[in-house]
Amino acid sequence: MTSESAPASDHDSYGCPTPPNESAKHQKQSQFQSQAQESKYDPTFTDRVISATGPNAHTRLAQVMPSLVRHLHDFAREVDLTVAEWMAAVEFINACGRMSTDRRNETQLLCDILGLESLVDEITSKQLSTPGSQLTPSAILGPFYRHDAPLLPANSSIVFNLTPSVPWYDQAIADSAHLTGRVFSSASPQKPIRNAIVDVWHTAPNGLYEQQDASQPDMNLRGRFATDADGRYALYCLRPVAYPIPDDGPAGQLLAMLDRRPQRPGHIHFIVSAPGHRTLTTQIFDARDEYIDKDSVFAVKDELVVRFVPRAGDERARWSLEYDFVLGVDGSGEGEGEGEEGTK
Ligand code: BEZ
Ligand code: FE
């Protein structure tokens, strides 16, 4: 049924049909399945589009575009996409583009809520890992990284200018945490890396990164730490809190239309780098978080879920966490890294 022939009440403002009940949904699903077996549309059409590619096409594009076209066409046929629906999608993508600036990437956010950034991250890291290596899993970078966080001495706090006048002071005290661990090379046997850089950032207890919040000092809750001869890094930070991804644009509208929430479980971001090793971009997730199984951007992996434990005898922190990172060796051979080896 096309949008033109349908009664207006069966379609929403995007021109999408609104199935009146569950049985209609099931009828539609079985209709999709039978179409997959026997298409009612021109069976030569997709091949004609694919074979339009010329002999001098860019190599990787010539490899991936036939698959993209085939999946796109199959999708359109499978759901009987109408012109009105396709036009709504074009408008939606245009709106993502219009909203994007050098401070906000709405199209990336769209990919995030569709799980595409996390999937591509997994595909990329699988390509780089060798069978049996116990590398720390990666996770998406997200849009709030800043390159030039201050390089701080070990055991510094990344919570800057915390005074009782800060609105979230009490929560910051209750969630104050000491975070430490070691950075290892995946070379066999694993060796600690001296002078690896652990670049860390997270939100304040109000759920905002410092660049989203004029009341926070510049570079608040960000820092870079060099590992010592044991490969150890150490810092004071806060237990992270859940926060919503920016949902005041098209990606947020889509989330709402899908009856989904924008929240991410509390997490701490890291970029861990060392000469001769592959840079690791990852996040750790606080197991206490109610959204741990409901990340709006699908970045949680079991190995990245952590449990803070109560800390005694340290007036600077009520919680402790120890978390190690294992970096892959750069280049082909494991164990051929040029990073500075620490003591075992
Ligand atoms: C973040 O963790 O900072 C983030 C990731 C994806 C989308 C929005 C925010
Ligand atoms: Fe984040």
Image: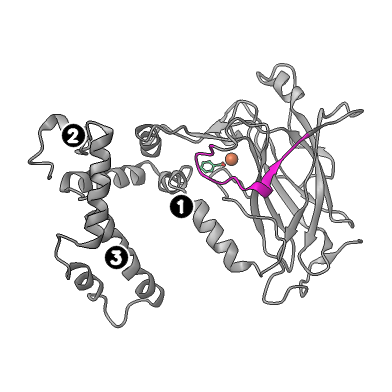
Residue occupying the point 87% across, 54% down: 228
Give the x, y percent position of residue 336.
Answer: 77, 75
The residue that mark 1 highlights is 116
Q: Secondary structure at mark 3?
A: helix
The amino acid marked with disc number 2 is His
Give the x, y percent position of residue 24.
Answer: 23, 37
C-alpha separation, residue under disc 1 versus residue under disc 2 = 28 Å
What range of the chain is rendered magenta?
294-308
Q: Which mark is residue 11?
A: 2
Question: Looking at the rendering, which quadrant does residue 223 occupy?
Answer: top right
Please, is residue 173 above or below residue 112 in the view?
above
Q: Residues within 10 Å of mark 2 (few under 14, many from 20)?
A: some
Q: Secondary structure at mark 2?
A: loop
Question: Looking at the rendering, which quadrant does residue 216 occupy?
Answer: top right
Give the x, y percent position of residue 64.
Answer: 38, 70
Please, is residue 24 above or below residue 229 in the view?
above
306 sits left or right of 241 in the view: right
Rendering quadrant holding ligand 2 = top right
Q: Which mark is residue 70?
A: 3
The amino acid marked with disc number 1 is Leu
